[in-house]
Amino acid sequence: MLVWKQLEELGMNLECVKRQSFGARYERTSKDQVLAQRILDGRLAMSPHPEWQLPQEPGWLENPFKDDNWQFQYHSLRWLDPLRREAIAGNPRAREVWERYVRLWISSNPPGTSPTKWAWIDMGDALRTYELAFGLEMYVEPPTWLVASLTQHVRWLANEKNLGHGNHALHQHQALFVAASILEHAELVDLAILRMGELVAESYDSQGINEEGSISYQEANYRWWNEALRRLDLEGIARPTWAAALETAPESLAHATQPDGTYVRIGDMDGGSPAKIKSAYTQYVTTAGSKGRAPDDLIKVYDRGYVFGRSGWGETERDFAQETFFSLCFGAQRKIHGQADGGSLTFFANGYPWLIDTGKYLYGRHPMRTYVVNRPGHNLLVASGRKYDRTVDITLFRKAESTRHFEAMTRDTGYEGVLITRRTIFSKRGEYLLVLDAVSTDEEVEIEQRWHAHESSSVTVQKTSAVLDNGKAQCELHWIGRNGSLGTARGETKPYNGWTSTGWRKNKETTVVTSTQKGTQLSFRTVIGARSAQDGTKSSMRRIAAGYLEFTVHGRVGTEYVLVGKKGAVISDHPFPAEKLDAYFSEGKENFKIPAYDAEALFSSLTPGISTVDERRVVLEAAREEFKRIGKTAAHRTGLISGMIDIAGNDLNLPTELKDEAKSRVPLISWDQNHPVSNRGGKVRSYASRSAAAKDTGHRGIQSYRYGSLTLPVATIPGHGSTLHVSFHGALDRGKYSLPRFERGQSLGGLGINQLVFADPTLDIDPDLSLAWFLGTASQDLHQEIAKFINERMKSLGLERLVLSGSSGGGFAALQVATFLPGSTVVAFNPQTSITSYYARMAQKATDAVFRGLDVSSSDLSQRLNVAERYRVHDPKVDILFVQNDGDAHHSTEHREPFLAAVAELPNITTRTITESWGAGHRSPNSEVYLRHLAEVDLRPLVDAMAKD
């Protein structure tokens, strides 16, 4: 049982007052003198409200703006703090006025009998407790009336009947801790800490998500809780175990940040960013990737009601701001600062937010507040004339993810007698949303599907689509099948319709795009962010079997086919056959079966230019049977699928199961040199061995040969002079580019020098890999193999000098290959130097695919992942030019600098760095920059060619 001390029994720790006097609006600022003078002049301004003439003797019932928040702040007395701070700085007038208003408030508002509820409202009581407690510092001997009032506040806060919920309770617990510490009441200090622990357990789940239902309050609570922990630290109290619950909160804020560095608006909020949160994750998203670290996941599902998805983190030389982002809400709709937004979506693409949520506007009664809080203010279905029950939870009853898509499905029963489901499918390559809304009811109902465009966008409604245009880019909403009656609303007030909040009591007109249908069984099928085909054809749908729909969608990188069935969704580059559709929805993950043989064995009996069509057909059929037995994952990892594509060449049919793979990876072996295969890099000439390929110096196009389970392709550009230039590519957008990819071949091809442009065959072993650093396989060190080819080519040509270049992962490959080519020069643009120091999402994916569970810390394997380690073992003679973007802190601090430190004592390594400004994040140099820095290492033919231009 709590034992209350008498006033005279309490201590008074004024040093504690000084330690604890911090927090929002309680700290010294450069504007304190001006702020204090304004109050001394009788003018009260509490943001975000207008200024008001402060009476000499308030009655404490004032409410000049008819605003709840104003009354809340007024009774908190926090607005007096500039006077307190100025009094401590030596202004006696400030203390006099502070005392007068505080004593007037105390005498007019006894606890329990105050004439207004705002006097002792939860959280307001805590803020006022701070003001009283911190005010003690103005006195050598604190006056009895102030200590008595502070004690009265402590008793109030200690009474659990007076506690609020969520962050209001947190402020109350903090204030109790502060005041009890100052008054040296140990039992109440312990009570405050105990309550904090209980509140953390109630407020946070295992994913670090707070209960309040707003992204802004997710951030605010994180800051407030860290403020509470700082208060414990200052009193020498060890951090309780519950503090660990806060550790994952910053990552959630990074996931909730759009590519423009601002928060997606969900719940009570009008904007903001995580710029003030000290975390590598939040630093990354607020600096466009130039500093900090990206989270590992592209799509994150938080059980408390959020899905955040994006195309990337800007770490593959694509601008962070140009990534695509979406959010989906679900779960409880009566959260403390949440809204009736279950099932609502937002969408960001091409650098701009297109579909938005509408914010908070204010706390209190107003038609605009009613609009933004309830269903009409969100991107949802609204039933005309029906009352919605916000106590209903929106369930997320399906979520699935593959290399091509993410799918989420929500269930909503908030309208009595009406079932609403929303199925959201995000194409990872096409970067569009396919939204399938379904309504089922026994009685006819009118349903309006609503989409809020960003306020900067104009909207043009066409027959089956709406085009959003902000003058710089466009985003299209397209309805497939029965699209209902399309319309728009903007800036209406009877009732409010077509608005978005931009701040406290501030709003702007925006356009709501609507599709309206009547009936008992309704479907809305909407594609967001897709495009029309080159011939103007829009997305379409066909019913290919009972329970199956196929959508043809023209996305960012071409046409995709989305098969939707009861068991899930599948995306392909080809139309789906009407038969055996269930096979596309096999349950569970594919088991990795041990193959009977790999692609190396597959090719053991085949030789380009010699093997007949019949011989290849027999091997291809055997490979198909093995593929059917072991499945796609194992077939990719062992090189079987790319091997089958190469065996088929341009004259044999691939199994129908490999249609998609054939589109993303073209054949790389010409079996008949008179009828070679070809692609964007030119005609392919294939060889039985590395030496045979290296010695054929006159071919302009692609050369290929088998290297273990891989086919190694290199684009060869014959030229003049004594120097050979070799380049490597970095990460590839697998949706945009098919394999092989020969980067910068065209921009470098006309400069008259001998060149080799390598494409990474490691990407063949996993269709989801975008970056593999030319690692090869577990048993095949591709860096050494490429070096051997280069060495033999130089001998065949009689060349004297070698320059290797690459950007990002291509720079890593250039540095690694140089190990085995003494005397070479490397030009590396923002390279990785240690794969394990790169972003885990990409590094782990590559090492898992290549090394398949082997211990990569072993000496032989770790050298392949770390350039400096390999250099220490082999001590090669290499001259390195680092070209560094000053907006890419990660590659400077995590790669270049550690590498330079590690090789500083190696006598044969010479390095220099050129730093330039290309913008924030991991950016790729353009052709002009690339050529200019090749000239820095005396590639004289390049200089001559540029001079001629």
Image: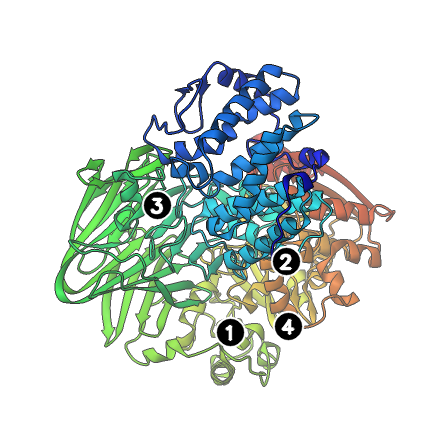
Position of the C terminus, as image quadrant, is: top right
Q: Helix, strand or loop at disc 4?
A: loop
Q: Earlier in the sequence, mark 2 or mark 4?
A: 2
Q: Is residue 822 above or below residue 278?
A: below
C-alpha distance separating marks 2 and 4: 16 Å
Q: Is residue 318 visible in this depiction of the protein?
A: no
- As shown in the figure, which amino acid type bears the numbered disc 1? Ile
x, y (%) of residue 310?
A: 46, 53
Pair 3/2: label in front: 3
The residue under label 4 is 852
Element carrying mark 2: loop
Q: Amino acid at mark 4?
A: Arg
At a point 62% along the width and 45% down the height, the residue shown is 177
Spatial CA span between label 4 and label 3:
44 Å
The residue under label 2 is which amino acid type? Trp
Closer to viewer: mark 4 or mark 3: 3
